[in-house]
Amino acid sequence: MKRKFDSIGLLMIILLIVGILLKFYIIGNAVNTDSVYFEKVEVSPYFLKLAGNTSNSGLTFSRFKMRYANKSAYIKLIYTLPSFINKSGKFEIHQGEYLENVETLYLEGNDKNNKNNKKIIWKK
């Protein structure tokens, strides 16, 4: 009986460690808007091109999320800790989207309730 509990405890510890590693190295978090700078911003009715970097040397670009609301587009850059999968903070986004109705493009940070964690990247 004790062996069974030892095995369950070990399995729970392994799952916890794997979950933590997934969160920090694969899933990541949205980066703070103050730490991102853009080198290129091109918006047309049919595509979006963004390029830039983060001033935080301990983070690497993983992916982005985009949402639309009230003639605005909100982009959220997701960063993780450096790994063999994600190696650089630089990002290049080429997105074929229908953006004709978008009048403002925002960079959105981690905290939706904080007004300072959202900034305008592009305005029509």
Image: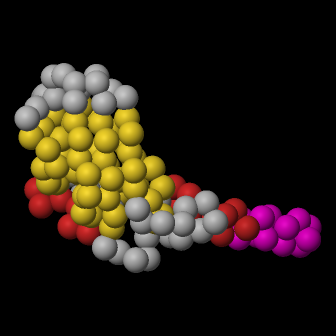
Question: Which quadrant is the C terminus positioned in?
Answer: top left
Asked whether residue 5 is drawn in magenta, I would say: yes
Estimate the x, y position of residue 64 in percent, counting from the top left.
Answer: 39, 47
Task: Identify the colour scheme used.
Answer: secondary structure
Q: Residue at x 35, y 57 (%)?
A: 30
Q: Quadrant of residue 55?
A: bottom left
Quadrant in which residue 57 is drawn: bottom left
Q: Residue 13 vs residue 47: left or right?
A: right
- 105 and 112: which is toward the camera: 105
Q: Nearer the viewer, residue 32 or 89?
A: 89
Task: Answer left or right for 81 relative to 46.
Answer: right
Give the residue displayed 64% in from the left and 66% down from the top.
84
Q: Residue 114, can we see it?
A: no
Tell me if residue 48 can be seen. Answer: yes
Query: Could you tell me which residue is drawn at 11 percent across and 56 percent down?
Result: 115
The image position of residue 41, as x and y in percent, is: 23, 47
Query: What kind of secondary structure does the magenta stretch mostly adopt?
Result: helix
Image spot of residue 6 (x, y percent):
84, 72
Q: Pick the residue in front: 56 or 111.
A: 56
On screen, 45 above or below 31?
above
Q: Residue furthest left?
A: 124
Q: Is residue 98 magenta?
A: no
Q: Position of residue 2 (x, y in %)?
A: 89, 72
Q: Which residue does the image show at 18% across and 41% down from the upper left?
A: 105
Specify whether 40 is left or right of 17: left
Compared with 121, 94 (above or below) is above
Q: In the rendered view of the protein, which quadrant contains the N terminus? A: bottom right
How many numbered marks appear?
A: 0
User: In the image, is residue 100 above or below residue 43?
Assistant: above
Magenta residues span 1-13
